[in-house]
Amino acid sequence: MDLKEKVAVVTGGTRGIGLAIADAILAAGGTVVINGRSSTDEALALIERYGRQRVVLETGDVSIPADATGLIERATQHFGQLDILVHAAGGPAPGKVLDLSAESWQAAFDIHIHPVFFLFRAAHKALALRGGAVLLISSVAGLRGCPGTVAYQTVKGALIPMARALAMDHGHENIRVNVLAPGIIRTRFHDAMTDEAKRHNIANRIPLRREGQVGDVASAAIELLCNDFITGEYLTIDGGMSMRVTA
């Protein structure tokens, strides 16, 4: 897929990994509707850089089904097409099973999993019309054990079989669905990490001896979006962390 003149919707696109993926799509010649619960300085800077003809900010909470569906409907109506859907919206969900409230458990599904159902259903007709690509953002936490994050691990892990099911069911329509599984990527998600934990990660957990940057994930995203013969797969971007037997 050549991204020139392609239209993408990126949830969680106002900061962090989502913003970096949106930026990379724009740099490759695409047009992007970025979504977040609120505007950010980073999102406004992206609009300033590429112009309002190519970047549209649509605020809304995609954990609310009507907001998810409405986002796709407005994007399609505005540009007359939709070629790419990236679900990067998410957030931490810490706690062991005995510590979590039922509301916190449900909230993890509401933001990470359920939006994919509503976003894909709303986007399906447009994606099938032109042959489209869907990209879901998982985590190495969904692949390997990670203490004290049962809800986060569960929802991130669930994105992989969900993507494979969608890829299998809709491959004949030339809709491709893939997953990225980032490791420790320096964003505000990791702001609470102590300096001691950071040093431990670099010295003992990550073979490449550094944290990742959002650009590392964005470049992988572009490959999965552009390569027309990859579907139903996940790609790990973690500096080798998840291949270790011990940490």
Image (cartoon, grey):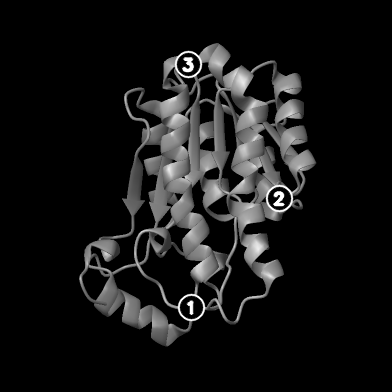
| Neighbourhood count class around disc 3 (C-alpha, 10 Å): few under 14, some 14–19, many 20 upward | some
Apparent side of residue 141 relative to residue 98 in the rendered image (left or right): left
Picture residue at 55% right of the left edge, 76% below the top: 97
Disc 2 crowd rating (10 Å Cα; few below 14, some 14-19, many 20+) is many
Q: Which residue matches tag 1?
A: 148
Residue placed furthest toward the top: 129
Residue at the far bottom: name it: 196
Q: Is residue 60 something one can see in this rendering? A: yes
* Element marked by disc 1: loop
Q: Earlier in the sequence, mark 3 or mark 2?
A: 2
Give the answer, above or below, for where 92 lies relative to 51: below
The CA span between labels 1 and 3 is 40 Å
x and y percentages locating residue 30 in the rendered image = 55, 26
In-front residue for pair 14/91: 91
With respect to residue 102, does 204 lie above or below? below
Q: Amino acid at mark 3?
A: Glu
Find residue 173 and name its label: 3
Label 2, on which residue?
63
Locate residue 7 relative to residue 158 in the image: left or right. right
Query: Residue 14 placed where, x, y %?
Result: 65, 49
**Which secondary structure lies at badge 3?**
helix
Q: Earlier in the sequence, mark 1 or mark 3?
A: 1
Cα–Cα gap, marks 3 and 2? 27 Å
Q: Residue at x 59, y 52 (%)?
A: 112
- Image x and y of residue 82, in percent: 61, 22
The answer to whether the residues at label 1 and label 3 have Cβ atoms under 8 Å apart is no
